[in-house]
Amino acid sequence: MWPPALIRGMRAAGDMDGFEAEASTASMVSGASSPYQPTTEPVRESRGWRSVRCDGDYIRSLPGVLKSCQVVLALLAFICIETIMECSPCEGLYFFEFVSCSAFVVTGVLLLMFSLSLHDRVPHINWILTDLVNTGLSALFFFIASVILASLNHKSGAEISAAVFGFLATISYCVNTYLAFRKWKYGSGSQNMRQSSDYMRARSESRDVDCRPEIQRLDA
């Protein structure tokens, strides 16, 4: 016959072992269902400059060809106007110089952005509208500067060449402005249609949720 004190000690030890087993089991279950467990989903690597690629389709397209012609014509017009040593008056020459240099720099940057697909890395900028504004202003200013230079020139070869390149650049910018306007117009229309369709789909989904009594009971 075992002593009563020894029997009570054995029962207490057994109860403690059972409690520890249940606690370890509960911790394993809770750990398995915990949302903070490490996942095996691979981490996406950030794209660096190695992923920059030349977009040959854009370069061969009509907007790409026009952009290339605009850069070349603006550069040639700027070089021709810089070779003029004497002028009287010089305001028209200075204005033409500013327009040709600005068009060369801005259009060259846009051509580089579109050709290397760098504009996709800055999605918060409306690049279609930016291109439209650039081509429209460049066409207007090139036309004004070329008319002023042609009316005030002294029949020198450099001034005539600069005016010719200016008018050719004006034509190129006008065509590009028309294409950019069409792209901006149709792009804005499709975006508005997509937003309206998303709004109608959200409205229909919310209406379906309101019509389901079981969901209403769960929410209550």
Image: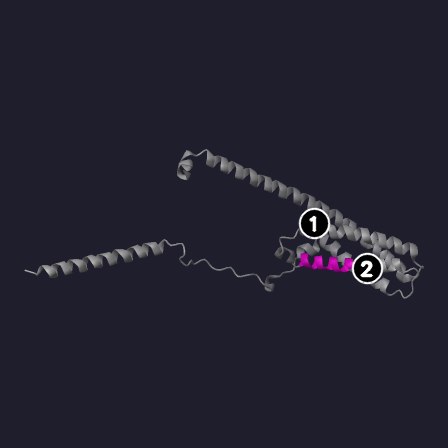
Residue 57 in the figure: left or right of residue 41:
right
Q: Amino acid at mark 2?
A: Phe
Q: Is residue 216 above or below residue 105?
A: above
**Marks 1 and 2, the one that precedes in the sequence:** 2
In front: 35, or 175? 35
Residue 200: x and y, percent?
Answer: 56, 37
Q: Report the residue marked by disc 2.
A: 98
| Residue 117 appears in the rendering | no
Q: Report the residue marked by disc 1.
A: 129
Region in magenta: 102-115
**Does the magenta portion include 105?**
yes
Residue 183: x and y, percent?
Answer: 69, 46
- Dominant secondary structure (helix, strand or loop) of the stretch shown in magenta: helix
In front: 31, or 54? 31
SS at badge 1: helix
Residue 111: x and y, percent?
Answer: 71, 57
Residue at the spot 9% in from the left edge and 59% down from the top edge: 4
